[in-house]
């Protein structure tokens, strides 16, 4: 590929490429003229280039619309929006619809505004959804609460394109007035409502859809996905880091040609972004699984644009934003070049110049609320962690490797006054969720099986879905306190303690969720803390991610919040000891 960089009037003429037309499902040779950031003309191949006009020789390449990630959490990347954009734009993503649910649970509407502000410096475009469930449940203590009035103010922002995932589907089905008021707020401004209803079916699903919820990204089986689509829901096919549903749902995309379906990543972690990419990896997997390549591209471009009302992008056509992805073939989707707003910004594996602001947002502050330490440990932590010595049958959270669901186990344990389980400590560890937002100072204490923390030590994290309190597990209270205090000092993140000393630490001072460091640095930090956790005996693939989901009280079976052990099936807190 070659290009002539004559400045002219800012126009760029892409010549000789094979256009992927997601309107008609065709591929054919065409030239594309970009001017002032927009696509001015799509012309028959061989059209003359005007004097002084920059030209890009695209012979042997496919010209695609820039990819649109229709549902993701930038917080899960653990980097700023600007750094996320710097990472994914070389993989063809030029727009992402971010649900700032995580930062909202820590910093509220101010945190959402802060994140939106920091995204303005990114090289690709961000759109946002207004987080609908903050807090996710009343069974935990979040850092903030967003009601209908706060959401209505967010929904009026042009950068906000939908009401975020409605996780409280029981509230929708029961017609909770506060929940319905949030959905009504989205309706008043003509914006869709994203869904989140794993396993919901039958009459309750009909009620959920009738209330105005219009998409779903939690479907995990073909039967579930088909039922939801038959009722009119748009299906978001998720292929993230912790949850991968593409293989199960791909037959539906093959059957329908991907109509009313889109690819999303939801939660994508730094190591996966670096090793495998983003939506480009999903396209590779989909095509390898038998999906028509143009249908696959449509699911990552035109379809999310249509669902969110982004009529200015998602297709190579006159009047649309000139976001283009040039690839070698429609199987490997290897990037050759990326054009953003009519400007060649990435080509041949390197940036063309340094896109304005691409690194500025990585280290720049993200507003006042993003600067402060958001980890506020309660007084007398040792006293709050203490459980009276006892032997007997106890409720134990059973980790399922590779899954975010857990088991509700009943095991014989012996817990001493120091928080140690003696010989059983090789199988069972003490775990605590410490309220870190400075609101209650509450601490929930429980037991967990499957971490494998055989040696004296502890692991801790302030990434703890969804309220993001501080979660810590260890062999004794002493080790757990050292880990918690290390995170309190650095503003949050991940910590590993061995023999009373911090052996690995990854600070995430931006709300205790993100770093302002480059993604490669963060990925190395995650690798280091996971390696340190394995040195304690933990054999899980991603120890810190496994830990972070043990506080999520909307996923079965047994979880722990700052208010205590939570039986998800019974939807109530339960005591540690049985009988």
Image (cartoon, rainbow, N blue to C red):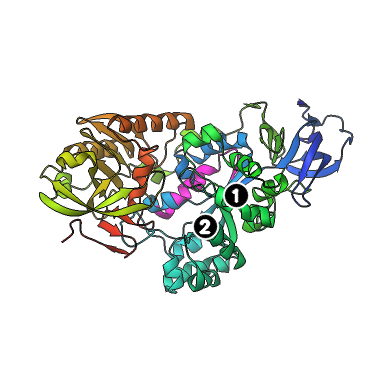
Image position of 14 (left or right of 533): right
- The C terminus is located in which quarter? bottom left
Is 111 part of what is drawn in magenta? yes
Residue 406, position as x, y percentages in the image: 35, 52
| N-terminal label among 2 and 1 | 2
Q: Nearer the viewer, residue 561 or 187?
A: 561
Residue at figure coordinates x 63%, y 58% from the top left: 307
Q: Which residue is mark 1?
A: 263
- Is residue 564 something one can see in this rendering? yes
Q: Which residue is mark 2?
A: 219
Camera-side mark, 2 or 1: 2
Range covered by the magenta-colored residues: 108-125
Residue 266, position as x, y percentages in the image: 51, 48
Between marks 2 and 1, how big is the CA–CA gap? 13 Å
Residue at figure coordinates x 61%, y 51% from the top left: 250
Q: Quadrant of residue 487?
A: top left
Image position of 466 (left or right of 8): left
Q: Secondary structure at mark 1?
A: strand
Q: Is residue 405 above or below residue 484?
A: below
Q: Secondary structure at mark 2?
A: loop
Residue 197, position as x, y percentages in the image: 48, 62
């Amino acid at each position: 590929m070659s290009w002539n960089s004559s400045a002219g009037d800012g126009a760029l003429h892409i010549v000789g490429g094979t256009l992927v037309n997601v309107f008609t499902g065709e591929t054919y040779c065409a030239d594309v003229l970009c001017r002032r950031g927009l696509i001015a003309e799509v012309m028959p191949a061989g059209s003359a280039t005007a004097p002084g006009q920059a030209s890009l020789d695209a012979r042997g390449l496919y010209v695609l619309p820039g990819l649109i990630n229709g549902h993701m959490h930038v917080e899960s990347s653990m980097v700023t929006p600007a750094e996320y954009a710097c990472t994914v734009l070389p993989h063809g993503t030029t727009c992402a619809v971010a649900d700032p649910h995580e930062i909202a649970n820590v910093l509220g509407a101010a945190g959402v505004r802060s994140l939106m502000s920091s995204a303005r410096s990114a090289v690709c475009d961000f759109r946002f959804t207004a987080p609908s469930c903050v807090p996710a449940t009343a069974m935990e203590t979040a850092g903030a609460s967003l009601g209908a009035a706060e959401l209505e103010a967010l929904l009026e922002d042009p950068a906000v394109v939908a009401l975020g995932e409605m996780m409280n589907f029981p509230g929708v089905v029961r017609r909770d007035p506060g929940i319905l008021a949030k959905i009504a707020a989205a309706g008043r401004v003509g914006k869709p409502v994203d869904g989140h209803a794993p396993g919901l079916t039958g009459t309750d699903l009909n009620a959920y859809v009738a209330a105005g919820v219009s998409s779903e990204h939690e479907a995990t089986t073909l039967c579930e996905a088909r039922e939801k689509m038959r009722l009119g829901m748009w299906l978001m096919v998720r292929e993230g880091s912790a949850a991968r549903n593409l293989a199960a749902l791909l037959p539906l995309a093959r059957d329908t040609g991907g109509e009313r379906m889109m690819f999303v990543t939801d939660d994508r972690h730094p190591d996966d972004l670096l090793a495998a990419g983003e939506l480009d990896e999903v396209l590779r997997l989909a095509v390898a699984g038998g999906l028509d390549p143009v249908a696959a591209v449509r699911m990552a471009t035109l379809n999310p644009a249509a669902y969110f009302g982004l009529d200015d992008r998602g297709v190579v056509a006159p009047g649309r934003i000139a976001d283009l992805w040039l690839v070698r073939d429609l199987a490997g989707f290897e990037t050759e070049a990326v054009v953003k707003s009519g400007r060649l910004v990435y080509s041949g594996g390197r940036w063309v110049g340094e896109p304005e602001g691409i690194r500025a947002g990585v280290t720049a502050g993200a507003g006042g609320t993003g600067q402060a330490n958001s980890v506020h440990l309660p007084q007398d932590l040792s006293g709050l962690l203490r459980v009276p010595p006892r032997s007997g049958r106890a409720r134990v959270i059973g980790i399922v490797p590779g899954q975010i669901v857990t088991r509700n186990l009943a095991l014989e344990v012996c817990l001493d006054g120091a928080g140690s389980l003696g010989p059983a400590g090789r199988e069972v560890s003490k775990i605590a969720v410490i309220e870190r937002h400075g609101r209650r100072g509450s601490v929930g204490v429980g037991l967990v099986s499957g971490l494998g923390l055989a040696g004296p030590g502890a692991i801790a994290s302030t990434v703890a879905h969804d309220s993001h309190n501080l979660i810590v597990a260890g062999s004794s209270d002493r080790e757990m306190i050292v880990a918690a205090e290390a995170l309190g000092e650095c503003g949050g993140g991940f910590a590993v303690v061995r023999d009373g000393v911090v052996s690995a630490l990854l600070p995430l001072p931006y709300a205790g969720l993100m770093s302002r460091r480059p993604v490669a640095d963060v990925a190395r930090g995650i690798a280091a803390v996971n390696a340190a956790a394995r040195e304690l005996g933990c054999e899980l693939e991603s120890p810190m991610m496994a830990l972070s989901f043990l506080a999520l009280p909307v996923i079965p079976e047994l979880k722990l919040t700052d208010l205590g052990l939570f039986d998800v099936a019974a939807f109530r807190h339960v005591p540690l000891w049985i009988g």
